[in-house]
Image (tube, rainbow, N blue to C red):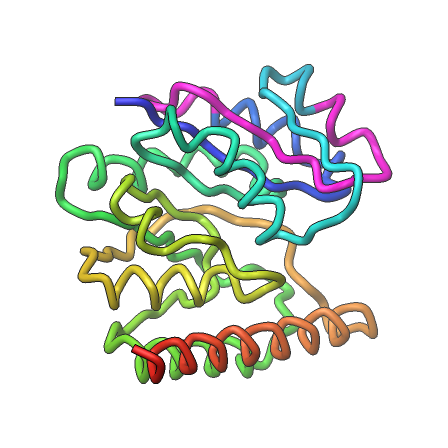
Amino acid sequence: MSVIALIPAHDEAARIASTVTAAIRVPGVDRVLVIDDASADATADLAREAGAEVMRLETNRGKGGALQAGLDAVSEQADVIVLLDGDLGTTAGEAVALLAPVLAGEADMTIATLPRPKGSGGFGLVKGLARTGIRLLSGFETSAPLSGQRALSRAAWSAATPFATGYGVEVALTVRAARAGMRLLEVPTAMGHAATGRDIAGFRHRGRQFLHVAVALARLARDVRQR
């Protein structure tokens, strides 16, 4: 069974090498593909030096677009895909906990729950919107609606893709997989990434995230009505 880790990354030079190194060491992972989303820094070179395969995108496509490009490249070879953010650093090794239930046939998609990062500046508005939308559209109760750290069987990723654009990726994955009857399992991990602070940049980021999640939910609701 072929397991391929997909890591979308944009300007992640500070952590990509340690993320790749940890991902490569996860038992069961056969390949690690970093999709460099038109980074302006050394992300691609550092990922390659750390042992990853690297796909370089010349224009920025956002997380969903980068993941789709990666999936398109490996879909014929992959039985299971593991989705990891580029800024996880050494905690990417926690992917072993996500992979085990899928390989054992106990789940079709696992979702990492993460401890609340120190210094997190969010007020929970985006998370609340995502959690409520997922429940209303699929019936699945989630505590980690925005977690991007996941493992998916071929059946799960076939049912849940193509990836949504922007920050709606995770919400769409969950809703589509749940509505397709996939077995979803949340798995506690000690993963961690850079938290968004309570500064102008942080509030802008959360504003874009809120908008993208709302758009993704609206599109998913439309799809449900059309069936």
Q: Is residue 124 left or right of residue 107?
A: right
Quarter of image, res 35: top right
Where is residue 124 shown, x and y percent of the image? 53, 79
Residue 30 part of the magenta segment? yes
Q: Specify the quadrant that holds the N terminus.
A: top left
Quarter of image, res 203: bottom right
Where is residue 122 shown, x and y percent of the image? 61, 75
Q: How many marks?
A: 0
Residue 1 part of the magenta segment? no
Where is residue 169 shown, x and y percent of the image? 51, 60
Eyeballing the image, is 157 above or below 53?
A: below
Where is residue 70 shown, x and y percent of the image? 54, 36
Magenta range is 24-46
Q: Specify the quadrant that holds the C terminus.
A: bottom left
Q: Is residue 147 left or right of residue 198?
A: left
Eyeballing the image, is 82 above or below 186?
A: above
| Relative depth, front residue between 131 and 118 | 131
| Relative depth, front residue between 208 and 24 | 208
Give the residue furthest to the front: 226
Which residue sits at x=76%, y=48%? 60
| Relative depth, front residue between 77 and 26 | 77
| Relative depth, front residue between 98 and 122 | 98
Q: Is residue 73 left or right of residue 205?
A: left
Which residue sits at x=18%, y=61%? 181
Which residue sits at x=55%, y=22%? 21
Which residue sits at x=43%, y=56%? 114
Give the residue furthest to the right: 40
Q: Is residue 13 left or right of residue 178?
A: right
Quarter of image, res 139: bottom left
